[in-house]
Image (cartoon, helix red, strand yellow):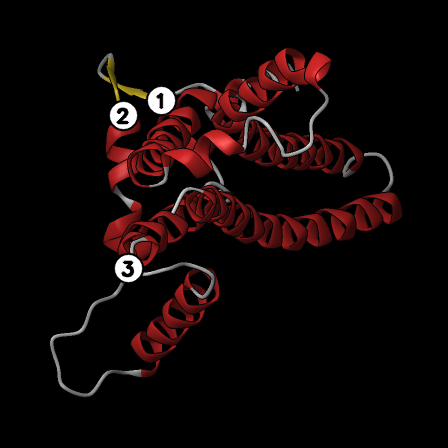
Amino acid sequence: MNENLFASFIAPTILGLPAAVLIILFPPLLIPTSKYLINNRLITTQQWLIKLTSKQMMTMHNTKGRTWSLMLVSLIIFIATTNLLGLLPYSFTPTTQLSMNLAMAIPLWAGAVIMGFRSKIKNALAHFLPQGTPTPLIPMLVIIKTISLLIQPMALAVRLTANITAGHLLMHLIGGATLAMSTINLPSTLIIFTILILLTILEIAVALIQAYVFTLLVSLYLHDNT
């Protein structure tokens, strides 16, 4: 019980070398592929989920926005698999690192904003100053809109990091309480263990929901700039 509460969030190393890159590259290897004309049930279900997700996110986009469909589908699959693998015992979750989430959020946000300024610069600049704004409020409103635009990637990364980290910490605390109570009171241990199982199911749902929310917000930023 003397283990550091945040020890599981430290990036692992192998012989002094960071192993985070290998962990990040591991989830794509778990995605099944088929070389046959007729797919099995697992591949068919996977393709149905991908089509359903891409259709739901791409419905609101025009032709230029739909060119991002492959990237957005790959993003949601990567985040979802990474979050789910992080729930396994003695595993490391890369999405608990703010640096990694920023590395995903900033390029996608910047690409969407740059696309908006290149294709629809008038509409992009119109977001900074809504029509009918009183003249004395123009400088303050432009500053506020600029700050809100620049803070979007930070909000994306912090939201994902906070939700995944909070769930892992709560599971760690309840797991430690279950282990400590196992030698003191068996009925209390069973109650806490039941709570831990329910929390694990909740965390599986959170892992999938956060992957969807992250990708959906990137899709909305793209929609605003295309």
Residue hosting label 1: 12
Instruction: Report the disc number at residue 187.
Output: none
- Res. 91 in view: no
Label 1: state its secondary structure. loop
Going by the numbered disc 3, the residue's amino acid type is Ile
**In percent of the image, x 70 and y 48: which residue is there?**
199
Q: First in sequence, mark 2 or 1: give its number.
A: 1
How packed mark 1 is, by other alpha carbons closer than 10 Å (few <14, some 14-19, many 20 or more), is some
Q: Horizontal placement of 62 versus 182: left or right?
A: left
Going by the numbered disc 2, the residue's amino acid type is Ala
Residue hosting label 2: 19
Q: Quadrant of the N terminus?
A: top right
**In percent of the image, x 76 and y 32: which residue is there?**
177
Q: Nearer the viewer, residue 11 or 192?
A: 11
How packed mark 2 is, by other alpha carbons closer than 10 Å (few <14, some 14-19, many 20 or more), is some
Q: Nearer the viewer, residue 193 or 64?
A: 64
Residue hosting label 3: 31
Q: First in sequence, mark 2 or 3: give its number.
A: 2
Residues tagged 2 and 3 counted as in contact (Cβ below 8 A): no
